[in-house]
Image (tube, rainbow, N blue to C red):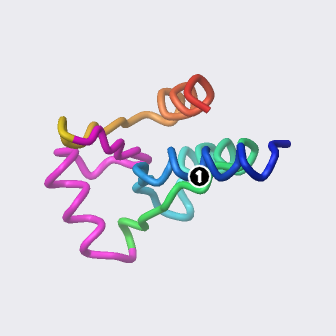
Amino acid sequence: TRSPQQQAEIDRQTAGLTLYQYEACPFCVKVRRAMKRQALAIQTRDVKRCDTAREELLAGGGNLKVPCLRIDEGKNGYRWMYESSDIISYLQSRY
């Protein structure tokens, strides 16, 4: 568990992350569980139910594969990370 101040800082840091996923995908479930275990408030976008999310994923990431974590790198734009194990490793090492 984190202090309220630590959690607020983590929430601020994760504000630039978005997980493109869909509910029934087992690899997406794996990533969402890892996010929950770490108490990470990462926005999720359902690419099956939202045409806008699907278009964003295809335009930005270049592939309709899920899960995909969009990482806002500020002036450098966005980095798109596919593969559930890579996403979980990134989140564990960063937070």
User: Is 83 displayed left or right of 53 in the figure?
Assistant: right
Point out the residue furthest to the right here: 1
Where's the C terminus, which quadrant? top right
Residue name at image x 45 percent, y 57 percent: 21
Q: Residue 51's quadrant in the figure?
A: bottom left
Q: Amino acid at mark 1?
A: Asp
The residue under label 1 is 11
Q: Residue 50's quadrant in the figure?
A: bottom left
Q: Which residues are magenta?
A: 49-74
Residue name at image x 27 percent, y 52 percent: 64
At mark 1, the secondary structure is: helix
Q: Measured from the top left, where is residue 94 in percent x and y?
A: 55, 28
Q: Which of the pair 39/62 is nearer the observer?
A: 39
Q: Measured from the top left, where is residue 83 in percent x and y?
A: 43, 34
Q: Measured from the top left, where is residue 66 in percent x and y?
A: 40, 49
Point out the residue furthest to the front here: 5
User: Is 80 displayed left or right of 60 in the figure?
Assistant: right
Q: Measured from the top left, where is residue 11 in percent x and y?
A: 59, 52
User: Is 25 displayed left or right of 58 in the figure?
Assistant: right
Residue name at image x 85 percent, y 42 percent: 1
| 46 within the magenta span | no
| 55 within the magenta span | yes
User: Is 63 displayed left or right of 2 in the figure?
Assistant: left
Disc 1 packing (10 Å; few <14; some 14–19; many ≥20):
some
Residue name at image x 50 percent, y 44 percent: 13
Q: How many badges with numbers are in the image?
A: 1
